[in-house]
Image (spheres, grey):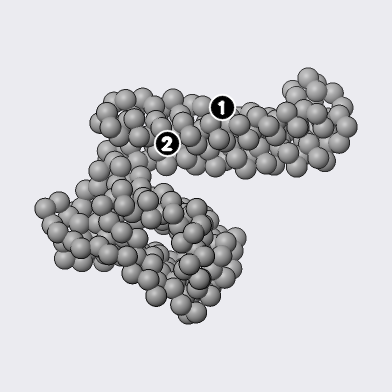
């Protein structure tokens, strides 16, 4: 019998285990954030430290507010309605997992041994394989050129990672595709990252008004690039081009 079943008598043992799991997850998030904070202070420039701290503060504040709200609702329903309490615990678990994923992304970005385009592609590959695992979508990755030759600064790593994670989430939720392809290639003085699918396409006027696309465009601009978007009834593609140091690349948005 779990300890929580003794501390909280009358609560089903399975629910006690779920509460215990959430407590352990919360502990893991706290520990990971402390490690990330030390790395930020040690490795990042002052500007990047401030930006990361600001971004994480917003993320942390929002998620913890939601978790706190559901924790209060859970405590109100534990005795009266264990099934409703369980539903609230699921929501707490969902938001805690997302917060933990954010911390993991930060730790990855801060790792100086993973500072090139190939490492970024591998990180996105791992994320995509996990994201699409239980779906009907076949996810694949393709690369060409020596991706290790292009070192990526910390802020570029973060923006590219989060941009393409958002794109993969969108493909999973909205594309109705059977195939999703993530590509990275060295082309002239640029590295090109793209995500394409064979789904139903989208109305660019509607999609461009959405928060997800606005966030992706904003990150592309912070990269000194532009988000190239193509969509038709046979599928969609987004692309970002990053110039090598000293190279000149003209990036203009493309719509179809």
Looking at the image, residue 46 sits to the left or right of residue 163; the answer is left
Q: SS of the residue at dot 2?
A: helix
Is the residue 250 above or below the residue 218 in the image? below
In front: 2, or 178?
Answer: 178
Looking at the image, residue 82 sits to the left or right of residue 255; the answer is right
Q: Position of residue 66 (x, y in %)?
A: 63, 35
- Label 2: which residue? 55
In front: 203, or 122?
Answer: 203
- Is residue 92 among what the camera can see? yes
For residue 68, which quarter of the picture? top right
Q: Position of residue 106 (x, y in %)?
A: 40, 38
Q: CA distance from mark 2 to mark 1?
A: 21 Å
Residue placed at 29% from the left, 26% from the top?
42
For residue 16, which quarter of the picture? top right
- Is residue 141 among what the camera can see? no
Q: SS of the residue at dot 1?
A: helix
> Are the residues flagged by discs 2 and 1 in contact, CB closer than 8 Å?
no
- Label 1: which residue? 27
Q: Earlier in the sequence, mark 2 or mark 1?
A: 1
Q: Nearer the viewer, mark 2 or mark 1?
A: 2
In front: 41, or 237?
Answer: 237
Q: Position of residue 194 (x, y in %)?
A: 35, 64
Residue placed at 61% from the left, 31% from the top?
65
Residue placed at 57% from the left, 40% from the top?
97
Looking at the image, residue 163 sits to the left or right of residue 82; the answer is left
Q: Residues within 10 Å of mark 1 (few under 14, many from 20)?
A: few
Q: Residues within 10 Å of mark 2 (few under 14, many from 20)?
A: few
Quarter placement of the C terminus: bottom left
Labels in figure, total: 2
Residue placed at 60% from the left, 40% from the top?
95
Q: Position of residue 77 (x, y in %)?
A: 82, 32
Q: Of the numbered discs in the image, which one, if any, rests on residue 235? A: none
């Amino acid at each position: 019998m779990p300890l929580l079943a003794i501390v909280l008598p009358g609560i089903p043992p399975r629910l006690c285990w779920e509460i215990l799991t959430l407590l352990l997850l919360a502990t893991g998030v706290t520990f990971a954030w402390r490690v990330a904070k030390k790395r930020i202070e040690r490795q990042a420039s002052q500007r990047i430290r401030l930006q990361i701290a600001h971004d994480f503060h917003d993320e942390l504040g929002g998620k913890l507010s939601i978790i706190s709200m559901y924790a209060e609702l859970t405590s109100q329903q534990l005795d009266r309605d264990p099934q409703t309490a369980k539903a609230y615990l699921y929501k707490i678990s969902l938001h805690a997992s997302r917060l933990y994923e954010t911390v993991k992304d930060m730790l990855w970005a801060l790792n100086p041994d993973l500072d090139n385009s190939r490492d970024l592609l591998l990180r996105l590959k791992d994320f995509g394989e996990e994201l699409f695992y239980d779906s009907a979508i076949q996810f694949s990755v393709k690369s060409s050129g020596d991706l290790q030759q292009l070192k990526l600064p910390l802020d570029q790593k973060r923006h590219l990672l989060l941009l393409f994670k958002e794109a993969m989430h969108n493909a999973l939720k909205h594309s109705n595709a059977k195939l999703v392809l993530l590509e990275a290639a060295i082309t002239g003085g640029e590295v090109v990252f793209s995500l394409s699918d064979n789904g139903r396409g989208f109305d660019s006027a509607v999609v461009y008004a959405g928060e997800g696309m606005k966030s992706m465009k904003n990150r592309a601009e912070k990269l000194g690039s532009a988000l190239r978007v193509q969509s038709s009834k046979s599928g969609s593609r987004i692309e970002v081009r990053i110039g090598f140091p000293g190279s000149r690349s003209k990036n203009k948005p493309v719509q179809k």
